[in-house]
Image: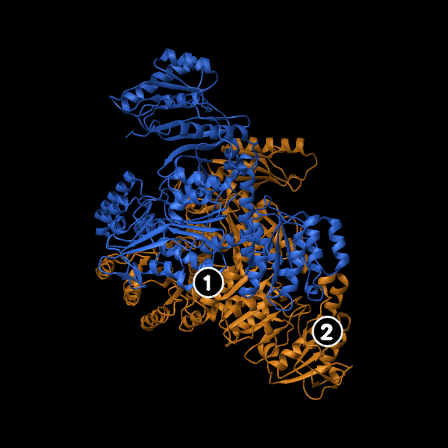
Chain colours: A orange, B blue
């Protein structure tokens, strides 16, 4: 794997297709490099000129004397392959291909792209692009990009990195970040991703000391495992990764497909994986920027208790609503503290939201006094202050900030976001002092919720994953129900006991062994719809009953499906009660085995109330899956039923995830439906395993 | 009712409690009036000074010669009553009370407030406040307010009006509006609402020609009927009303209650009423401002077909996702048009989103050509363009705007929102040309969705309401089940037929008349839990069976509830099949009779999947209620069942709304549970009517 510096901090760069016109694709990167005073060597390559933008030009890469680290390619698509060969000959470490006209245009372009990728793979040269806008490292003043946004707003270094598949949208993110005063040190657009893809880039950024927050934009992820690993590295290094994955909706996915020509896997799986590995998925750029802004102080509260201090009761109500939307708590101040605050200011609402009222205008010290009470006695994990245009006023804004600073010096680990209306200069004063600012109070709450998510995830770390069982040795092909049940039972999953009986006598014996009423089902690879074929009998009782039922099932089979291969009859106990659930595993094209769990019937079919996680995982994660179902109340014993055994359910869910991962090579999907959640234990009544190469 | 001018355009104003210090509550309104050059007469009242801020001062209101329209009161709470008496004596039309210390402080303040309200009511003097921040009319340069925000950002008139209960939050809305370049003509904060309340204010604004868009902020509505009427007036006059009602969540409602001391009614009812009467409810200030901004061109598309034109494929995907979130359609361009666009620009994505790609930099005419195709051949109801910082560039922003203007001159009724990054000046150029601008593309989509909501509501107008039936003559007190059923059946609601039998013979006769199996239930005001008392028998068949069952029910009643008054036994048919629904009416403290409809069981109990509307309404509205249920698929025939008779359901829902309204004086609530939705018709099996004065 290439190092961070190979991409972001080479000592030398050649620009092939360098243009004298700083507005052209081949001219702009050179102009950036010159304007921004890159300290390494810069070699324009242009056979038709002696100098380009005043710098000595070379006829080809091979004419450059000395070592060459980085090659920027801005020539027509048909000429790119030759340039790559030269770069390999020059032992360059990295080639960045800006040129378009590859996989995004159709099969011919895709073939050219594959050829380049293959040449690079063989040689060890790493490739960024093609069809991208390039990258920059503002700390090293390295700007191999043709985005024009750098001219509009000069980059300032900071701890933020942007990893974007889209060039134009990556530029948009950069521009908005600049307006918000966010310092972006590293920025890269990966385009068609012939070689380097966004997951590997996130991994590099997560490992790099100069990065503290990562903003990622993706339309599809090429390597789910690396993406998950990169997110785990970031979690371990306490770096928030804010992910915008577009193509959430059917119409959006179609547009993404038209745009990039690649299928993206199921969107709900992306959401699950991003959350599972500690990152945060956003829907809008604004949300992404808000969260990045809130990350500036690098304080990530691990609890969800929010304190609100406001000069407007109305804003306090509004923010309480927003907190509720985001699952945050707004617990009241202790009674004693409320009484003391009331003694200071009789008209105040000291409960939480704490309203300092317009009295604040007469006595700014109310703010530090009340804030100290909230931090000390209230013990909130994070605070939001609503000061609106007061903080923007030249008279009050500065002393308010001084009070906030002084207070927070005694509470260095607490996050305090501010909702203010102020000009850029005042806002930057607040932000440099460690107080991220938001114009809209609802957005401050949303950002706080995201930081609390990161705090909880950083504190929890990677969930422990139990050891995988050995593969079950499944052979591709159709697996009969009883065989599937046996495989899953052996893997520790709670399957109903059933016995395959090949004769009336065997059925009678099985029924006697099971005891009580039994269900009997014909077993035949040729009979798919058993009920319609008269192949199911329920509530059969006693040995005699079973013997007779066997005969009847055989007769029905002979009548409904003459010539069907019959393997026997499955005898199983009738299970009473329980709540019907569905537990399954499927193979996502990006992320591999994914486990899904939900309540049966309308919940899965109509309401899409299903929890997903990438396999494998332990019981803690499984419990979280149960907890995120809308219908979880049913399992918890609402609606008059006894509560289900959630431990047993979690065990089964985790167990299936281990099984699915261990058998990922051969198993395409598993379905346990229904899985009955019982007051004690759980039990699957039916199971289906589809193998990878089965029709 | 007072006129608009009484509040917003008086010819003279007295300021009681006028201060020489322009920073004080009594000083600031006078300073505003002088600075802004109000053209009417201004009379400071201050007994201790000859002049206030250089203007002749009067010892009391009574010393002012000539007529007086408007009195601003900025004296301590205890002195307000005297001032009001003087204002009445001077025959002023309006008094605005800024002073705090009334109902918000407790019972004593509430009593003072009630006294003032009563004096005003008797005399015809209208009162704004107390405990408010005042109002302004920037067109008339009338500024009776002590908000300091006017000094920070000078108001510019426009067609927008703000009606806010909160003073501080009203000021915040004003400040953000100024930053967005929105012209606010009329702004009022209503505070404690001793007399004038926000619903009446919205009515005045909806009627006033100078207003085209209304932003309202409320914590509670005092008069639900007037609120609904005001929204209907606005709809009729094609004026969007954007409502922020806070206290949505439990914690928010509690904060609101602490803040204003008034209970707000059920939040879900507010949402239903706001939507039902054509207005739009927002959750955040930003959303409110975005929508107001999008209203500037006063074009409200009546369809939901969105066209997207972009220079970034990624942004196109993102906006498609957002459109899907908001229920908009993003239909593709016709095939022929796509082919023609491809011929112009082979790399373009001409489907919708239409991606003009970076080629746009070389040829700006792509924009008008593609946009014309979208408007002409695509026929979209609204367009959004994504140009990011390109539109902010001095080189490209101006010619791009010229192209957009020229194109849209041929499509004057179409709304075209823009997502651009630009400085305020450039943004204002776009907005003045009729192109509302949004930095974040997702917010542009959200605003478009709101305008499409208004467009549809304006086009539809007020839904027709059938004539109310005469009141059913219900007498307060407990109503037995069979009596409730009879009342509702008479009102045209589909009730199961049942017969009250007082003897075994009568029961036998009833069973014979009904035919088939019947259900039998004991009827007694003293037996509430019939099943537990052995008071229900199902599936009774034949006259003999009914005779026997009658005896058994009587025995059970005598054993389980000795001494209970028995009115007889209810005999009703056993109904097979159907989907269990709940249909009910309840009395909302703000809005009066409200109808709720949902699916039974988990849908209502766990998922809160219930549709609400304010009564009365017709079948069209009832159909919309069915359509907004998450579980509506069950009624539409998913899950293998035959579809329910939605016409019959809608008829029943509307019918109950008419009944509830006609009997609002006496009926507190009605519950028909279950109401069986059948393939043909629907039928309530049980009914409960609770009267207003019943225990």
- Asked whether the beta carbons under mark 1 and mark 2 sit within 8 Å of each other, the answer is no
Whole-percent x, y for residue A111 in the image: 75, 65
- Percent coordinates x, y for residue B120 in the rendering: 28, 42
Q: Please give the chain letter of the residue carrying mark 1.
A: A
- Are tags 1 and 2 found on a single chain? yes
> Does residue A132 sit above or below B447 in this rendering?
below
Judge whether A423 appears above or below A693 on screen: below
Q: Earlier in the sequence, mark 1 or mark 2?
A: 2
Query: CA gap, disc 1 to disc 2?
Result: 40 Å
Image quarter of the N terminus of chain A: bottom right
State the residue lying farthest toward the front: B65
Percent across and percent down for residue B567 are 31, 18
Mark sitting on residue A119: 2
Side of B539 where A351 appears, left or right: left
Neighbour tally class for label 1: few under 14, some 14-19, many 20 plus, Cα within 10 Å: some
x and y, in percent, of residue A215 in the image: 53, 67
In this picture, residue B395 sits left or right of residue B144: right
The circle drawn on residue B186 is: none
Q: Mark 2: which secondary structure?
A: helix
Between label 1 and label 2, give the one nearer the viewer: 2
* Residue A643 appears anywhere in the view: no
In the rendered view, tell whether residue B586 sits above or below residue B177: above
Q: Residues within 10 Å of mark 2 (few under 14, many from 20)?
A: some
**Quadrant in the rendering for residue A354:** bottom left
Badge number at residue A463: 1
Q: Nearer the viewer, residue A103 or B383?
A: B383
Residue A13 visible in image: yes
């Amino acid at each position: 794997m290439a190092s961070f510096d190979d991409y972001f901090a080479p000592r030398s760069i050649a620009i092939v297709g360098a243009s004298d016109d700083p507005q052209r694709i081949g001219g702009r990167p050179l102009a950036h490099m010159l304007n921004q005073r890159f300290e390494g060597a810069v070699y324009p390559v242009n056979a038709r000129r002696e100098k380009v933008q005043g710098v000595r030009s070379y006829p080809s890469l091979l004419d450059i004397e000395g070592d060459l680290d980085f090659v920027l390619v801005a020539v027509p698509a048909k000429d790119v392959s030759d340039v790559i060969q030269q770069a390999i000959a020059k032992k360059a470490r990295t080639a960045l291909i800006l040129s378009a006209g590859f996989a995004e245009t159709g099969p011919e372009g895709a073939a050219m792209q594959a050829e380049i990728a293959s040449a690079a793979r063989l040689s060890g040269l790493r490739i960024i692009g093609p069809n991208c806008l390039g990258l920059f490292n503002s700390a090293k003043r390295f700007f191999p990009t043709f985005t024009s946004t750098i001219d509009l707003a000069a980059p300032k270094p900071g701890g933020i990195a942007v990893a974007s598949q889209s060039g134009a949208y990556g530029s948009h993110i950069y521009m908005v970040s600049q307006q918000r005063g966010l310092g972006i040190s590293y920025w890269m657009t990966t385009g068609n991703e012939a070689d380097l893809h966004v997951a590997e880039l996130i991994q590099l950024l997560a490992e790099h000391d100069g990065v503290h927050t990562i903003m990622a934009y993706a339309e599809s992820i090429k390597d789910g495992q690396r993406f998950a690993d990169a997110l785990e590295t970031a979690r371990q290094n306490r770096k928030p990764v804010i992910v915008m994955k577009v193509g959430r909706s059917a119409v959006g996915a179609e547009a993404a497909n038209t745009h990039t020509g690649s299928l993206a896997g199921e969107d709900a799986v992306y959401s699950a994986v991003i959350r599972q590995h500690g990152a945060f998925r956003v829907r809008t750029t604004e949300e992404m920027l808000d969260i990045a802004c809130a990350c500036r102080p690098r304080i990530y509260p691990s609890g969800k208790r929010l304190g609100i201090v406001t000069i407007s009761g109305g804003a306090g109500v509004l923010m309480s609503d927003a907190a509720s939307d985001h699952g945050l708590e707004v617990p009241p101040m202790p009674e004693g503290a409320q009484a003391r605050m009331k003694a200071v200011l009789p008209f105040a609402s000291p409960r939480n939201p704490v309203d300092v009222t317009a009295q604040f205008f007469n006595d700014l010290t109310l703010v530090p006094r009340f804030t100290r009470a909230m931090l000390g006695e209230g013990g909130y994990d994070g605070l939001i202050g609503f000061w609106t245009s007061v903080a923007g006023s030249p008279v009050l804004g500065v002393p308010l900030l001084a009070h906030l600073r002084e207070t927070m010096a005694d509470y260095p680990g607490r996050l305090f976001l501010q909702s203010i209306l102020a000009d850029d200069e005042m806002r930057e004063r607040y932000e440099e002092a460690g107080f991220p600012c938001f114009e809209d109070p609802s957005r401050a709450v949303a950002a706080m919720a995201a930081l609390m998510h990161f705090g909880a995830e950083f504190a929890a770390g990677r969930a422990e994953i139990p050891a995988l069982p050995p593969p079950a040795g499944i052979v591709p092909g159709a697996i009969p129900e009883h065989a599937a049940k046996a495989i899953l039972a052996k893997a520790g999953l709670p399957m109903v006991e059933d016995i395959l009986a090949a004769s009336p006598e065997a059925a009678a014996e099985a029924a006697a062994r099971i005891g009580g009423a039994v269900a009997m089902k014909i077993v035949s690879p040729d009979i798919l719809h058993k009920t319609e074929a008269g192949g199911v009998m329920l509530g059969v009782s006693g040995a005699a009953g079973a013997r007779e039922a066997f005969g009847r099932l055989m007769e029905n089979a002979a009548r409904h499906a003459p010539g069907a291969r019959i393997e026997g009859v499955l005898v199983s106990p009738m299970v009473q009660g329980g709540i019907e659930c569905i537990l399954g595993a499927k193979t996502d094209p990006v992320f591999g085995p994914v486990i899904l769990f939900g309540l049966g019937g309308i919940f899965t079919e109509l309401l899409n109330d299903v929890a997903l996680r990438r396999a494998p995982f332990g019981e803690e994660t499984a419990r979280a899956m149960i907890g995120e179902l809308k219908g979880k109340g049913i399992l918890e014993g609402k609606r008059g039923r006894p509560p289900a055994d959630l431990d047993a359910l979690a065990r089964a869910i985790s167990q299936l995830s281990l099984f699915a991962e261990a058998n990922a090579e051969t198993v395409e999907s598993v379905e346990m439906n229904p899985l009955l959640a019982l007051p004690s234990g759980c039990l699957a009544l039916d199971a289906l395993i589809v193998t990878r190469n089965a029709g």
